[in-house]
């Protein structure tokens, strides 16, 4: 092989390796779902009220995993539903959460997580009714949980006993056009920490169907059933 | 020869060579004594994992013994290395080959004997330390045998691992379950470690307790709390995405403070305790699965209302 050919081959091989490395970095480390910004325009550490809106669907029609259970977060400005589980809140604020539950029920692996903790008053409201704990073993009443272990927050999501509750054909589901008997609305409030940082959240219901102990797949993938709450100031 | 001309005239052998053995042995001995005293007296009390519990202080003692035995070995290598670099180094103008090296039976026999003695001594020491100190804080399985000296009524604490949190049940206080680990000073604790999903490992660092948490297995570990303080609990088995966040902080408090906390928590958590399964050494997820199937059969659940068994990955 001639010298120019060998040099060319070397350059091509080098560029190929660089390209593969760049793809890995961009795709796996820097890629991922967007972060919904609920912090902009809010002065941190003043107790200001921030309203975060989410929904959980039994499946989704917006990803390459249509059979994966999934959360969506509403963009605070456009009000559009975004397929992500990352959101940003201001430090030292009151976070009012609203979560629409469009999924059916699944028993908790540990019924301890049927208890509401870490919210203001250790209470949540399911369709406006105050709830301190849900027993997932006694009936079809827990769909998922919204849990932030770093602040001891645990809110079990109530579900409709309607067996078709998870049949939202197109995701994200629309609270406006879906009959109210199909889904439930959970509301609760908690205080964001004064310490800035990343607080991961997860669902404690083993709802990752098709994976070991129901805790793989969507349970361990950003954009589906786990994510981060970024507390900023 | 340069090496010979520069060699000091101190203890010399019949050939005119100084007695290298003595010249290496004396500084090694002095350094070893100093190092061992420093390790035992100065560094030892600060070695991990501390002395918050019986198992921790025993582990600290074991590490001190290991360090005291290892230091002379390490120092011998270093002293010999420095001595060789200094005395036997190649000198300017010296083009002569070094003397031929022959085997030395006495030296070989010495290091083989010493190495064997050290290793066998550590084997015996390790075995004794495992047996006499209630398993040294490690999980002993469902039928622990290293429990000599444990009080007849230790505080039982069940550690339940799950992705990605440890929870703790106190069967002697109504079986309440909490996310907080609180232990009394001066009391023996009998941990029952299990998991309700994948394999975890309960590691209470300051207590010197580490026990695997396997689903369907009751893994028992003992310790006696010596001092009050904060306990760092971590999962020591890679268990999924948030394994790194699977930690919490417990407290070792006075007996009276513990009693007050336990009784208060038992009352506070009474309602949630009622919906927990009865206390058991392990929890079988298939029990819940059967309940779930019954719910599905009764038309109470949605299409996804199924508890996924441990052997999933079959689609439900």
Image (spheres, rainbow, N blue to C red):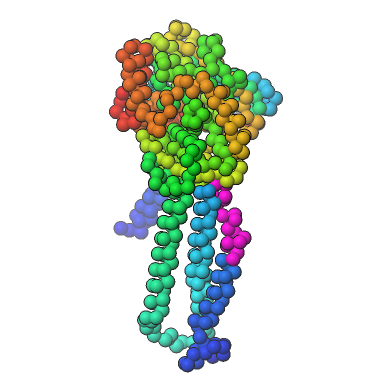
Q: Quadrant of the C terminus of chain B?
A: top left
**Residue at the spot 31% in from the left edge and 14% down from the top edge:** B297
Q: Residue at x 50, y 92 (%)?
A: B16
User: Which residues, given as a range, are shown in magenta?
Assistant: B37-53
- Residue B15 % position (x, y): 47, 92
Q: How far across and how far down the image is residue A179, in percent?
A: 44, 6
The answer to which image quadrant residue A221 occupies is top left
Instruction: Establish if A76 lies above or below B31.
Output: above
Residue B240 can be seen in this image: no
Q: What residue is rendered at 51% in x and 53% in y? A: B58
Left/right of residue B208 with respect to residue A10 in the rendered view: right
Residue A88 magenta-drawn? no
Q: Nearer the viewer, residue B297 or B177?
A: B177
Q: In this view of the protein, can residue B216 be seen by the observer? A: yes
Tally of numbered tags: 0
Depth order, front residue of A67/A81:
A67
Examine the rendered structure and indicate whether residue A105 appears above or below residue B31.
above
- Residue B45 belongs to magenta span: yes
Nearest to the observer: residue A184 or residue A43: A184
Residue farthest to the front, as pictured: B152
- x and y, in percent, of residue B20 in the image: 50, 83
Q: Residue at x 46, y 55 (%)?
A: B129
* Residue B102: percent from left, percent from top: 37, 83
């Amino acid at each position: 092989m001639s010298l120019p050919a060998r040099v060319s081959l070397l350059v091509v091989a080098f560029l190929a390796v660089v390209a593969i490395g760049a793809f890995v970095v961009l795709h796996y480390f820097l890629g991922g779902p967007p972060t919904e910004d609920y912090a902009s325009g809010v002065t941190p550490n003043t107790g200001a009220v921030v309203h975060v809106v989410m929904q959980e669907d039994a499946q989704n029609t917006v990803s390459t995993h249509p059979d994966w259970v999934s959360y969506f977060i509403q963009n605070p400005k456009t009000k559009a539903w975004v397929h992500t589980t990352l959101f940003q809140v201001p430090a030292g604020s009151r976070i009012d959460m609203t979560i629409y539950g469009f999924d059916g029920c699944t028993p908790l692996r540990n019924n301890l997580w049927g208890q509401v903790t870490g919210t203001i008053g250790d209470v949540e409201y399911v369709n406006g009714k105050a709830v301190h704990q849900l027993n997932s073993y006694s009936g079809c009443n827990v769909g998922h949980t919204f849990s932030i272990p770093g602040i001891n927050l645990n809110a079990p999501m109530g579900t409709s006993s309607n067996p078709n509750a998870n049949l939202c054909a197109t995701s994200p589901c629309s609270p406006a056009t879906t009959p109210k008997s199909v889904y439930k609305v959970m509301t609760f409030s908690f205080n964001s920490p004064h310490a800035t940082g990343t607080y991961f959240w997860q669902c404690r219901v083993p709802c990752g169907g098709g994976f070991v102990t129901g805790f793989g797949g969507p349970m361990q993938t950003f954009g589906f059933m786990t994510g981060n709450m970024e507390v900023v100031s | 020869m340069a090496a010979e001309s520069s060699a000091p005239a101190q203890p010399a052998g019949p050939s005119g060579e100084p007695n290298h053995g003595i010249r290496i042995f004396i500084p090694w001995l002095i350094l070893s004594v100093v190092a061992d005293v420093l390790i035992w007296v100065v560094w030892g009390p600060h070695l991990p994992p501390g002395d918050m519990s019986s198992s921790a202080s025993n582990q600290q003692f074991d590490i001190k013994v290991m360090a005291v035995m290892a230091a002379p070995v390490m120092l011998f290598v270093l002293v010999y290395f420095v001595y060789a670099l200094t005395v036997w180094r190649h000198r300017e103008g010296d083009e002569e080959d070094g003397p031929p090296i022959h085997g030395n039976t006495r030296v070989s026999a010495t290091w083989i004997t010493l190495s064997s003695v050290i290793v066998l001594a550590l084997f015996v020491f390790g075995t004794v330390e495992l047996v006499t100190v209630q398993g040294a804080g490690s999980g002993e399985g469902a039928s622990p045998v290293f429990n000599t000296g444990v009080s007849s009524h230790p505080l039982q604490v069940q550690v339940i691992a799950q992705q990605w949190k440890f929870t703790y049940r106190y069967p002697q206080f109504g079986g309440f379950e909490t996310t907080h680990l609180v232990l009394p000073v001066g009391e023996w604790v009998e941990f029952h470690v299990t998991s309700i999903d994948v394999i975890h490992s309960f590691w209470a660092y300051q207590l010197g307790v580490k026990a695997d948490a396997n689903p369907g297995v009751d893994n028992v570990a003992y310790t006696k709390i010596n001092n009050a303080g904060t306990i760092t609990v971590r999962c020591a088995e890679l268990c999924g995405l948030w394994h790194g966040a699977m930690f919490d902080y417990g407290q070792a408090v006075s007996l009276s403070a513990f009693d007050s906390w336990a009784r208060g928590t038992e009352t506070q958590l009474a309602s949630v305790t009622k919906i927990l399964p009865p206390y058991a050494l392990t929890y079988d997820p298939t029990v819940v699965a059967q309940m779930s199937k019954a719910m599905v059969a009764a038309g109470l659940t949605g299409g996804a209302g199924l508890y996924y068994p441990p052997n999933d990955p079959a689609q439900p």
